Image (cartoon, coloured by chain):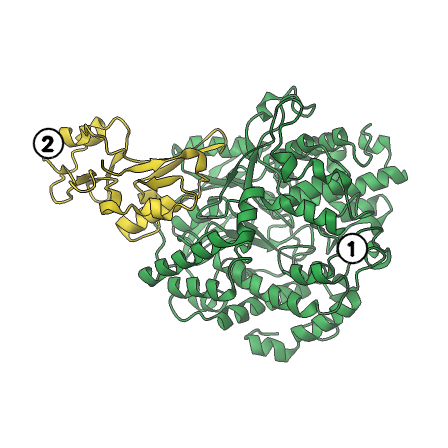
Amino acid sequence: MAWQRKVLRINLTRGEIYHEPLNMEWANAYMGSRGLGTKYLSEMMDPAVDALGPDNVLIFATGPLTGTMSSTSGRYSVLCKGPLTGAIACSNSGGKFGAELKNAGYDLLILEGRAPSPVYLSIINDEVSLKAADDLWGSTVWHTEETLKERSGDPQTKVCSVGVPGERGVRYACIVNDLHRAAGRSGVGAVMGSKNLKAIAARGSVGVTADEPQRFMAVVKDTMKKLADDRGRQGMTKYGTNAMIDTMHAFGGLPTRNFQEVQFAGSEKINPAAMSTANENGHTNLITNKACFGCSIGCGRVAHVDPKHFSVADKPQYWHASGGLEYETAYALGPVCGVDDIDACTYVGFLTNEHSIDPISFGVTVAAAMEMFELGAITLEDTGGIDLRFGNAEALVQVAELTGAQEGFGVDLGLGSKLLCEKYGHPDLFMGVKGQEFAGYDSRALQGMGLGYATSNRGACHLKHDVFSEDMKEQNGQGKARPCKDSQDEIAAIDSTGLCIFTAGAWGMEDYAAQVDAACEGEWPVERLRELGERTWNLERQFNLRAGLTAADDTLPKRLLETPAPSGTAKGKVCELDVMLKEYYQLRGWGADGVPTSDTLGRLGLSA
Amino acid sequence: MTMGLQIDPAKCTSCLQCELACSNHHEGVFNPALSRIKVFEFEHGRRSIPYTCTQCEEAWCLKACPTNAISINNETGAKVVDDATCVGCKVCTIACPYGTINYRSATGKVVKCDLCNGEPACASACPTDAIVYA
């Protein structure tokens, strides 16, 4: 069966472990991963609770296609209330951990309460135990993962864990699995740390099956071929996601120096061409590409820092290969901080993995700090003598090390951009939505992206909608609401399958539906997937409303609404959010207050 | 000249499609733990190497087997375990210098790559041609 029909629920406060059947009524209405996790979360917790308190619930959710032979079947979602946003958090990760959890026999892993002292969770099929992690508390992700693999005696054990920022409640701490894949956003790592849960080590040999094996394999063969033949996929394999940096620079949508500019001349020093060209020392940044579980794309980069570079010259422990620059990491450590040093960006990217911090939120927080430093609001005294100007790669490296260790000015940076800007008297310089920092797209140039950012249920996020092709055509608010709403629903469904949305360029909804239909019991036509996606979106919205968010939170910073883009294709333009948002609420079947109407809820089978 | 699995680790992205295909073909389940081909990662993921039986010409597993449970498939050259004859004594697993014939406690038998009767599922599934049957 594509579903294992099993939930592993752990009460950390009491140290109790429960094996429970999956609620199939919910699975039929929400499929898996993001959707099903949202349903369980909504049923199990009060959204108004403190995100870092014991009443928050932390869910790891696989999808019905996770662990199967569908391409990109290694995804899982982590859900909880996010400390960065106060909204629902739903962070998706690849690597191999999610498939291992599924292969151990579980659709969902639910963690409640708070362990009285540090623990890690060991899962070997149905042998599940909580073990003391006092000796691991304070250690990095990389050390923890290596230690737990050794301790398990099985090198195939897969581990996810948090480092010190997760333990200390850094609001954008992530959960890192397989050394450099992350459930990255909204601070899910801080929630894991708040539960005194250092790590999860999983090993599974139960296996996953499809409801109709032969038909499933025929569909897999067909969709694999489509993906192989897709030009976008081919580019992703060859260049990784960082090919976007050239596109965004040329277009004028590349957020630079905390969104003061939209193009960055230095981008050519950190783009895919720079990654694969030898420097003056004969060192080439990029080594190879790498895939997550089951993935025939392989967009991941494996890179290494030039051993002669100032950042690692005296640190041979960082000379090895690790996860290289992807677009969001490159943007957030590069242009938005004004930094064009590929080795510094790569090294800091390593640090974000090693210490479990989201590079997007971290980089944009540093960018805000840099702007406030240049304004004099943050002083050398505040930074501990670090000259935190835009473009200073040495400063970026120093503050990354401090944030990873949660020392010095790194504690302030751990607040995230919103609270940091408030603390230093410049709340308008926070570049994000609902407390979460923007990804690498400026919404004056990409207007539909602006609407997506403003309405994303987990705060500013580029992954929950896809208006890209419309955005590249015209820089205004016309005709963006419909594709934004529709793609939000479709992506919610794709996220609920257990597959990766990087397949969406090659596959239409009919391709996902065909795979789910062959893998799962029952009929799964495209319309069912779309409806399930819309149901999920509205349930996420309801969670947020119950958490205290309102339509007033569906907005963008003044800089994007009032200050025209200084260059590029959108020169002179601001983001036309108002017009898009009004149309969007109507299309959603929400009132002007952003609350789903009873008709809308009834149509989707949701209760008020 | 018999065909064999030509493995080029430089092309391997560690996606494990080969392991999924192998377990699906032989066991009817997607389960890397039951795969007869394994991808090993080295140097922090810098290198990924698919590893399985080389079907050596002088097959020590076959010679060591006290019950003659391992025979050669004349069409493919694969050394094949006959489940009905195998008594699970594990002598072959000691004889094999590569560790690519393994004992399964669940069945009490050994398993190894049999080249899927000339249509290896791993090679068909590999998206990067890191595994080619030629």
Which quarter of the image is occupied by the N terminus of chain A? Answer: bottom left
Q: In which quarter of the image is residue A397?
A: top right
Q: Mark 2 points at which residue?
A: B66
Residue B100 sits in which quadrant? Answer: top left
Q: What element carries label 1?
A: loop
Image side of residue B130 versus residue A468, left or right:
left
Give the distance between the C-alpha atoms of the residues marked 2 and 1, in whole angstroms: 77 Å
Query: Circle 2 marks a residue in which chain?
Result: B
Residue A209: x %, y % from top left: 34, 56
Chain A palette colour: green
Q: How many numbered marks appear?
A: 2
Furthest residue in direction bottom, as rendered = A599
Going by the numbered disc 2, the residue's amino acid type is Pro
Q: Foreground: A89 or A337?
A: A337
Q: Which residue is drawn at 74% across and 56% down?
A: A433
The relative height of residue A158 versus residue A559 in the rendered view (above or below) is above
Question: Which chain, by letter, is yellow?
Answer: B
Q: Mark 2 or mark 1: which is in front?
A: 1
Q: Residue at x 26, y 26 (%)?
A: B97
Place of residue A314 in the rendered image (x, y in percent of width and height, measured from the top left): 65, 19
* Farthest residue, direction front: B1
- Quick one: SS at disc 2? loop
Residue A412, placed above or below residue B124: above
| Circle number at residue A358 | none
Please report, as a chain letter, where disc 1 is located.
A
Task: In the rendered view, tell whether residue A214 sits above or below residue A287.
Answer: below
Amino acid beneath label 1: Thr
The residue that label 1 is drawn on is: A569
